[in-house]
Amino acid sequence: MKSFPRLRLPRWHNVLVALLLLAAIPVTCRLWPHDPLRAWFPSSTAVYDADGHLLRLTLASDDRYRLWVPLEDISPAMVEGVLLHEDRWFRWHPGVSVWGLFRGAWMTYVRAGNRQGGSTVTMQLARLIWHLDTRHPRGKLVQMARAVQLELFYSKHDILEAYLNAAPYGRNVEGVGAASLAYFGKSPARLSLPEALTLAVIPQDPARGLPGNVNGSAVIDTALKTSRDRLFARWISKHPDDAAARPLFDLPLRLRPLSRLPFEAPHFVEQVLAERRLDGDDEMRVVTTLDLGLQHSLERQVRQYVERGAERGIRNAAAILVDTRDMGIKAMVGSAGYSDASIQGQVNGTLAKRSPGSTLKPFIYALGFDQGVLHPETVLRDVPSAFGPYTPENFDGHFLGPVTATQALVRSRNIPAVQVAAKLASPNLYQFLRDAGISRMASERHYGLSLVLGGGEVTMQELASLYAMLANRGELRPLRLLASTPKTRGTRLLSEEASFMVMDMLRQNPRPDDAVAGQPSRLPMYWKTGTSWSFRDAWTAGSFGPYVLVVWIGNFDGSGNPAFVGVDAAAPLFFRIADALRAERPGLAEPIRRNPPNLRRVPICLASGDLPNAWCPQVGSTWFIPGKSPIRVSNVHRPVVIDTTTGKPACPPYEPGRTRVEVYEYWPSDLARVFAQAGMPRRLPPPLPDCQGGGQPAGDPPQITSPLKGSSYRIRMSRLGDERIAFTATADASSRTLYWFVDDAYLGSAANGQPLMWAPERTGRFLVRVVDDQGRTDSRALDVGAIE
């Protein structure tokens, strides 16, 4: 059998193959999937305000202050100083320096000097990652092996970056990112040369990096300063031009104690951190919308106000300031004292559900404007009224009679607000609040009309969002806590016209402090107060310039205090904050907002709020939405032709020289009654003869006020025929008698302004009708049911 000659490769080929195999090992290690070094070290979170001021540096999950910073964002002087001090041959050795180990052993064991380990930067990183005990030879060998492993799997860039982010800097501070923030209050990229070299020498003996308090500051100790200066001497041997910085090294270098790390806006920061946890966000640098200057101003005003109000029982307060231009929260004070356990200070009052009192009334009027129920000068009835079983009263227990919508809102009258709310269709106030994102609301039946007067609950942040919607011409936009949150156009819930008109009404609310109220100001204030039931919450919400401000006074335990009245307790703090911000920021101005295009000014009769007729004595004007706002001619003032011989109304044809025309005010019965109770009775129009009507302006038909529209009555079967229901109606002043019918069956008559009682003898659906003595009528359906 024929044999083939064996192929012999030249010897240099074997060497080449060996070299290729050797080179393949690190390449394979680098390409083999492995976690980045950053994954070995949990990170803190640094929270900043919008201008880059540190608000808080949190602890990492292992209770260390550690903030990962890319190598490119670290001062080059810091990087070079560390290598000059710890590992000059870092970029050339394979993770272990034989010369360094020999020198460390010689200095430690032969010359019996200070203990030196001879570890490279890579070896120190290995010790930090795997928590190695390197005080014994076996541990040192493991450290060396791990260092070689690191060099195989990671680049020099990654190893140096990881070491600088993991090196110990005293106590529980690790990494140059956290150290530069903790000790110098700046990022590693902004370190000066003395600061960079100071941090470069600390990891060799971290205990020396602990600053001691000296007059509230921290001065580095002598040993640390000596080590830093020694490194500087070596530095200028490489960088002679930096010798000019020597005077800086002669100055005392102060390091901030860890106890003085910033702990700003605690409630705001905790909300930011909580929302990030819910979103699964692990970003280490968080930039918020907060303005630290505005935050300090709010905190100062709240603290001083609570201190001065202690004698009135004011112990706690909260405030929130929102920039309507981008909806960023600029300042938030969740309580009067975060560390005060007596007031549960760590509770964030801006997130607590509280009764808003009358602060929701502006939105009732805005909905009324959009639904054509009224305009700003519509005259409303502030009279005793019952809305089925609900009988609201005014805060002061008095009634003003006829008031314009603007007066009713500014003076916070309850009855007119409920009257308007009862006329709202779609949406009503409940649906509007649901659409606006008010959370955790009960059913609509649960609230009824009491929602108008604060029967529900909102948070301060939700209320701030609602008032910002008014300032933003009816567009609801979400609040922003983070600068990275995109700005949105939002959702339109109110028309531009309705929002503008409500803001114009709120602008007319006079300040409670008369001394300042008389001073001219180029910055209008739009504001509204609120007081919850049993005096548990006092509110003031409003806007000025580009900001919306909401202020709350109360107790987190819900206890009431007669001093907790919105205009007396919360409004002064609202204006203290607003005045302080105007003084601190003289350039503060209201954003340019154009008037809505579909808005007009129309003349009105001031007495009725309707278009003036020929006999209206006083004419004003109001904002009006064409095609939407209610429009009719006033009929409060009506002429009556009087016979000069009898002094009574005359019948046509009128004889010249024997008649004169007198103008009378024809007020509805409920308003006439309030005038009389207030000691201001109006002259009653004379009864008109049967011949009247040809040239006499027609009056208003009666309006049934009880039973309430859409209401249903339930009566026990045993009480049928005995249980009575009150029938009432408001009627024109020209009416004297009202006639009542049930299903066209005559029930009886009552004088204008008096009720008539009816006792149903069966259950079912009835039609209730009222007719006045002028033939004008109104009707309403009524359901009567039975209960056992």
Image (cartoon, rainbow, N blue to C red):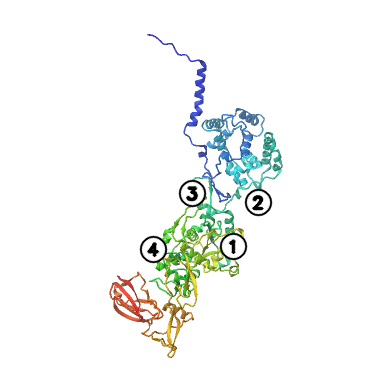
| Local secondary structure at mark 2 | loop
Q: Residues within 10 Å of mark 2 (few under 14, many from 20)?
A: few
* Disc number lying in front (3 or 2): 3
The residues tagged by marks 3 and 2 sit, at their Cα atoms, a distance apart of 34 Å
The residues tagged by marks 1 and 2 sit, at their Cα atoms, a distance apart of 33 Å
Q: Residues within 10 Å of mark 1 (few under 14, many from 20)?
A: few
Find disc 4 in the rendering and name its residue.
Answer: 426
Give the number of the disc on residue 579: 1
| Local secondary structure at mark 1 | helix
Q: Is residue 209 left or right of residue 666?
A: right
**Residue at far front of view:** 656
x, y percent for residue 56? 56, 49
- Three-letter code, disc 1: Asp
Q: Is residue 732 left or right of residue 197?
A: left
- Three-letter code, disc 3: Arg
Give the number of the disc on residue 216: 2
The residues tagged by marks 2 and 4 sit, at their Cα atoms, a distance apart of 62 Å
